[in-house]
Image (tube, grey):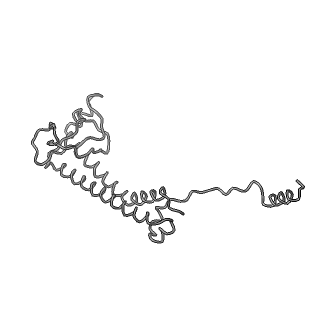
Amino acid sequence: MRLNKQIKTKIIEAAVEGAIKKRIAQLKDMESALADAIYSDQFGRHAEYMGKAPEGFFVAKRSFQLYIRAADKGRSPIPYDNDERPYRCDSSVTMTATRRMPYTSLQGIYLDHDHPLAIEARAIMDKHKRLWTGKKELQQQIAAMVNSHYTTERLLETWPEAAPYIPKPPVTENRLPAVTADQINHRIACVAAGNC
């Protein structure tokens, strides 16, 4: 089968997805566990009260913005006019379930630089960055391999492990001809003889 741009793109995407899929799931699980721990740390002592409060007193959320104070910045959580902010939004984290939170959490949750959960959050973010950097490099290497071939047969000669990533060719139905070969031959003979 000839490798056109569409097939090459599908091969590259499938190979990269297959390589990092498990690692992405692990990082999401780590991030959810961290979000649950941050919720417990920040609101755990109030969880029973928030659960009993009437509807509308608290907001139900599953994710929140996480702000971590830069190591060398002051104590004020109020952002400055320029880029020298004491807190930086590092990511949006998602908990395993929707929970009630105070409306102040809509602005995000703030942690000090040396807070144990902030240290864990930075470690997870570093793993995310390394994964995406590795993904880009892997994507470039696979693209170089795939783009150097013109057919799937030649690609499989060079890289046999690519077989699961090659999309199956579309199945075409074998349609029987409306007219048989004998009927066509009879018609040709008829027209040639002038009998038709």
- Residue name at image x 85 percent, y 60 percent: 189
Q: Nearer the viewer, residue 41 or 90?
A: 90
- Residue name at image x 27 percent, y 36 percent: 100
* Residue 123 point in image, percent of width and height: 22, 54
In the depicted structure, whether residue 17 falls above or below residue 79: below
* Residue 174 point in image, percent of width and height: 67, 57
- Residue name at image x 12 percent, y 48 percent: 71
Decide if residue 20 is on the left or right side of residue 52.
Answer: right
* Residue 161 point in image, percent of width and height: 44, 68
Q: Farthest residue toward the bottom?
A: 157
The answer to which image quadrant residue 81 occupies is top left
Q: Nearer the viewer, residue 117 or 113?
A: 113
In the depicted structure, whether residue 133 falls above or below residue 41: below
Q: Nearer the viewer, residue 16 or 80?
A: 80
Q: Farthest residue toward the right?
A: 195
- Residue name at image x 83 percent, y 57 percent: 187
Query: Is the N terminus in the top left, top right, bottom left or bottom right quadrant?
Result: bottom right
The answer to which image quadrant residue 98 occupies is top left
Q: How many numbered marks appear?
A: 0
